[in-house]
Amino acid sequence: MFGAALVILAATLAGWVQARQFASRPNQIRRLILALKRLETEIMYGFTPLPDALRRIGEQSQEPVRAIFVTAADNMSASNRLSAQESLEQAAINVWQFTAMKAPEQEVIRQLSYTLGTSDRKDQLRHLATAVRQLESEESAAREEQARYEKMYRSLGLLCGAFIVILFY
């Protein structure tokens, strides 16, 4: 009985972990959108150098978005000497595994990294606005996935655990 309870508990927890991924993804995308909008404001009104702006945005954000921007700012420091593109792209690659976000969101950040810091202010603002629109579209799709799959995975974890217990007995 104790073993059966452990199997059911483990399967249920696995289902809840997967369901949490579906719940976390839209929230993390929303945080990333807000961070990009703050970066847009920094570029437009703050006249802040890009490494300082990235660090400030990162410090104002919650994890894992914080890690992306702070890592990018660290990569642009004098000791690392990476370009804005390289630093943001490297930060996205290194930190992405710790997020609930998927490849489409990472691709938006990678595409943004190609133009960030390489063109005039107006062009950067245009690219940031494009990235925000793309992320808003991804957020909408993530919310639909959450509504469709979150509850299912919670139930499926419990049911799979019960099925395994039945198979063993």
Image (cartoon, grey):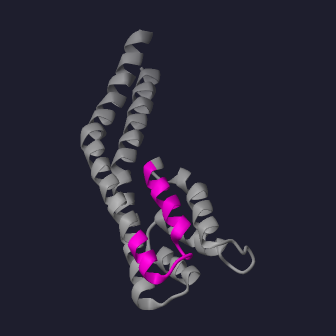
Question: Is residue 132 among what the camera can see?
Answer: yes
The quadrant the N terminus occupies is: top left
Q: Position of residue 155 (x, y in %)?
A: 29, 31
User: In terms of image quadrants, where is residue 86?
Assistant: bottom right
Residue 153 position within the rendered picture, expressed as x and y whole percent measured from the top left: 33, 34
**Foreground pick, 104 / 158:** 104
Q: Which segment is the magenta one?
A: 104-127
Picture coordinates of residue 89 (x, y %)?
Answer: 59, 61
Front residue of this view, candidates 146 and 169: 146
Q: Is residue 61 above or below residue 43?
A: above
Q: How many marks?
A: 0
**Residue most extreme to the right:** 79
Q: Main secondary structure of the magenta part?
A: helix
Q: Is residue 63 visible?
A: no
Q: Which part of the image, by quadrant, shows the C terminus? A: top left
**Residue in view at x 44 percent, y 76 percent:** 123
Residue 44 magenta-highlighted: no
Q: Quadrant of residue 16?
A: top left
Q: Position of residue 110 (x, y in %)?
A: 52, 59
Assess whether residue 120 is covered by the magenta stretch. Answer: yes
For the point 66% across and 71% down, which residue is it?
A: 75
What residue sits 39% from the left and 59% below the top?
28
Query: Is residue 165 shown left or right of residue 54?
Result: left
Quadrant housing residue 161: top left
